Image (cartoon, helix red, strand yellow):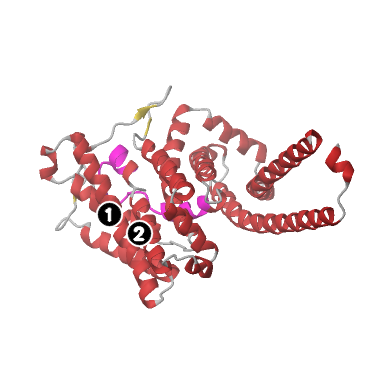
Amino acid sequence: MAGYLTYLKRRFSWHTLRRVGLALAAPVSALVFAAIVSVIILSVTGHSPADAAQQMADSLERPRTFANSLNNATTYYLSAVAVAIGFKMRLFNIGVDGQYRIAAMLSAALAGAAFMENLPSFLRVAMTIIVAMLVGAVWAGIAGILKVTRGVSEVISTIMLNAVATAVVAFLLNPSRLAVPIGGSNNIGTPPITEGGRVSGIPYPGSTSTVFGLSILAVAVGVGYWYLLSRTRFGFDLKATGLSESAAVASGVNVKKMVVASMVLSGAVAGLVGVPQLLGSSHTYALDFPAGLGFTGIAIALLGRNHPVGMAIAAILWGVLDQTSNSLDITGVPKEIVVIMQGVIVLSVVIAYELVRRYRLRLEQRDVGAALGTTKTPAPAEVTT
């Protein structure tokens, strides 16, 4: 009996190591392949890959660079979680970019309104966050309702809603409506958020830059995302519906309700994407407010395999690459090489995940075959040793 338990322990350890190895194989191979492609491009264009890598490494050693990388990672992570919620349901929420921009603009207009200055600071910040979530949820919910009532693909509807959101923001961000001149320049934005409505940054040792105070919000969202999927009935129904809609229906899940709920939840998280930047740095939604974060979230969700920890690592990697790329101009290397590297990572990780999936299936089939063979003709040596 003791020998059999030892055998099971060894088998369990082997399967655990193999599972971890297969989980890491795809992202690691994608990063390695992207690095190889970048080296080839740099060499062909007459630049030294070693010098470029050294310059990026030296830049990362500066505290300011790492603090800014964490700030980028905060917004990237929130965007990735918003996308991942849809992915778990086999829904492609391509509209995170429009959802967070219209949410940031309307919540900024509220936070900068004159009547808000008489409210306690905590209440002002809470109202800004809640309004951002509600606007994002409503905007994403439109796509969910169109899908369940008219059969409109969420890919098409969210892409079109991005365009509509851009038009709405451009319409409202006008001096005759919600915008005011910013700092005597040609830039315009919502009324500046006064001190009571802001969130102070977290000091970073050795740097004048601070980390967004609402980076804690990103951590809370990640924990909530993990708990929702792993410890709640809603999360189980969401994953079950994504894996097999017919099986979910057979088990009593209302698929249409789950589609709308998933899109609303994804949009609510998307509404938070611009809030750390808004309350921690910009303090107004202006023409130069960061754009494109929704599409970056898709890449990070793919690289992180929709896992809360995996997406966090991918978000930090993306933030570091973005910040260190600025130092490449010093050596004469085009910083666009980092954009190429990021694009190659996204493309290669999709292929790598598919290859790993097929390889895992082969291993599982082999294990099943071996188990069936053992069942038919058990080997006493394996049981007693």
The kind of residue on which mark 2 rests is Val
Which residue is pictured at 32% across the width and 54% down the height?
Answer: 101
Q: How many marks?
A: 2
Find disc 2 in the rendering and name its residue.
264
Residue placed furthest toward the bottom: 150
- Look at the numbered disc 1 and give the secondary structure of its residue: helix
Q: Position of residue 253 (x, y in %)?
A: 44, 65
Distance of label 1 from label 2 (alpha carbons): 9 Å
Which residue is pictured at 34% across the width and 34% down the height?
Answer: 213
Quadrant of the snapshot with the N terminus: top right
Q: Position of residue 27 (x, y in %)?
A: 63, 47
Q: Which residues are magenta?
A: 277-301
Q: State the mark number for residue 134.
A: 1
Q: Position of residue 242 (x, y in %)?
A: 51, 62
Residue placed furthest toward the top: 206
Which residue is pictured at 53% across the width and 47% down the height?
Answer: 307
Question: Tags 1 and 2 in contact by the CB under 8 Å rule?
Answer: no
Q: Position of residue 119 (x, y in %)?
A: 13, 38
Would you call the spot at circle 1 few (<14 residues within 10 Å), some (14-19), or many (20 or more)?
many
Q: Is residue 147 left or right of residue 51?
A: left
Q: Is residue 93 left or right of residue 198?
A: right
- The answer to whether residue 186 is seen in the rendering is no
